[in-house]
Image: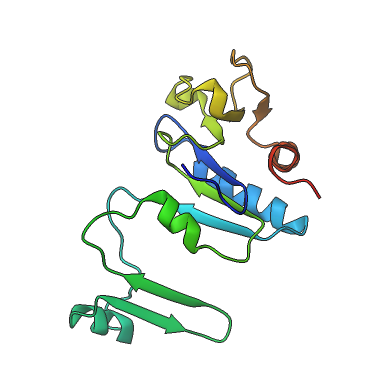
Amino acid sequence: MGNYNVPVVCVVSASSGTGKTTFLERLIKEVVDRGYRVGTIKSDAHGFEMDVPGKDTWKFSQAGAKATAIIGPDKFAVIHKTNQRKELDEVIAMIEDVDIILIEGYKTSTLPRFEVVRREKGTNIVSPSEYLIAVVTDVKEIDVPVPVLDINDIQGSADLLLANTISR
């Protein structure tokens, strides 16, 4: 993983269904409420469709356009078809005008991360300790050399995230 202009942190877990998305959604809101601009990246191993069938951008894509963009009054999106999955570094480089980038997934990367552990999904930690900022969990006792935070302690998680990444 490369050097970035802004801090990049992953939220990972051993398996799906642990609450990564919910935790990340709440963490984003807390960090934004504190005045920071947050970019996000989501890993999707199954493929996805952003174009809504029947809409103009979908029609253009179906007609064979390699890239399709839509520009609105307050946002824009570009969908670019590729022959292979983009590297994370390439996508990170495309995100502009943010203070931090939070990524859901990429547990095999060497990026710093929060790991979400839920009792009903098992308490195995998949992250090497040198990449861990903290473990967020509903389990009382987990033996790791980093802070262990309650999964609902979003303020504490945001404090730790910002203390480890951004100094104002």
Q: Where is residue 141 in the image (x, y as percent from the top left)?
A: 62, 14
User: With respect to residue 24, does 99 lie above or below?
Assistant: below
Q: Residue at x 56, y 35 (%)?
A: 112
Going by the image, does 24 lie left or right of 87?
A: right
In front here: 102 or 22? 102
Q: Position of residue 109 (x, y in %)?
A: 43, 36
In front here: 123 or 69? 69
- Specify the farthest residue to the left: 63
Numbered marks: total: 0
Q: Where is residue 121 in the image (x, y as percent from the top left)?
A: 43, 26
In front here: 122 or 108? 108
Going by the image, does 46 lie left or right of 153?
A: left
Residue 162 seen from this side:
yes
Colouring used for the render: rainbow
Going by the image, does 110 lie left or right of 86?
A: right
User: With respect to residue 118, does 141 lie above or below?
Assistant: above
Q: Position of residue 149 (x, y in %)?
A: 67, 28
- Specify the farthest residue to the front: 3
Res. 50 image quadrant = bottom left
In front here: 165 or 137? 165
Q: Which residue is drawn at 52% across and 41% down?
A: 10
Residue 43 seen from this side:
no
Res. 64 image quadrant = bottom left
Q: Residue at x 59, y 16 (%)?
A: 144
